[in-house]
Amino acid sequence: MIDECEPGAFRARSACSWSDYSGTHRSPKRRTFVLIERNTYVTKLSPNAQLVSTLFEEVAKGNGAPFWEACHDDVVWRTIGEGSWSGEFVGKQTIIDEIFRPLNRVLVERATVPGRVIDGGDVIVVQARGRNLTRDGQRYDNDYAFVIHFREGKIARYEEYCDTDLIARVLPDRMAAKSMSKPA
């Protein structure tokens, strides 16, 4: 049963498939997947889904430290595609140096707003929308699907699916971004 709720709250629905969010889906291991959407409420999430929700809240406040504390030292970050921002990066420091520092040099406003969380226990999927502005005034509002894999309660792999054509049109080459000065 789905109850009415206040805007901004979260409500759980069992996910039957990616396109049908009613009913219950049971994998051969009998795992229930829970879909969480905006304007809904949830009574119980897996610890991993709770952690991901908390991490997005903290990052939205400008506090990235809890994200890195929640990652294994050998965490793997993979961004799909063939462009300069795409690839697989291994280890916290490599990910910071190769992705986050260059992004912080390119973007003057940066936010990723989750719209949906799909709780699969050790695999959490987040659909989100970027709200970003480049230093030259272009909007970089990408759509994302993050597939976050957990091992022993920590993030082991973070897969980013997004519009790589938008990246190529709006963001500079990643290597060029690494050499930019920080925005004022």
Image (cartoon, helix red, strand yellow):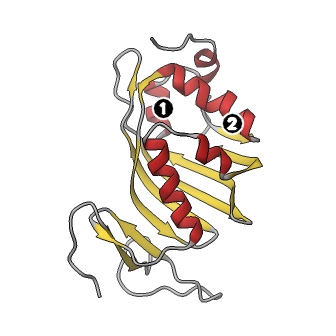
> Residue 85's x, y, as percent?
60, 32
Residue at image location 21% in from the left, 67% down from the top: 6
* Amino acid at pointer 2: Ile
Point out the tag, 1 or 2, that comes first from the N-terminus.
2
Q: Which residue is mark 2?
A: 95
Q: Is residue 78 visible?
A: yes
| Circle on res. 77 | none
Helix, strand or loop at label 2? It is helix
Between 117 and 69, the residue placed more toward the observer is 69
| Number of marks | 2
Above/below status of 143 relative to 31: above
Residue at image location 69% in from the left, 28% down from the top: 97
> Residue 55's x, y, as percent?
52, 52
Is mark 1 in CB contact (under 8 Å) with mark 2?
A: no
Q: Which residue is mark 1?
A: 167
> Residue 36's x, y, as percent?
39, 69
6 displayed left or right of 145: left
Above/below status of 132 relative to 78: above
Above/below status of 32 relative to 120: below
Residue at image location 38% in from the left, 32% down from the top: 132
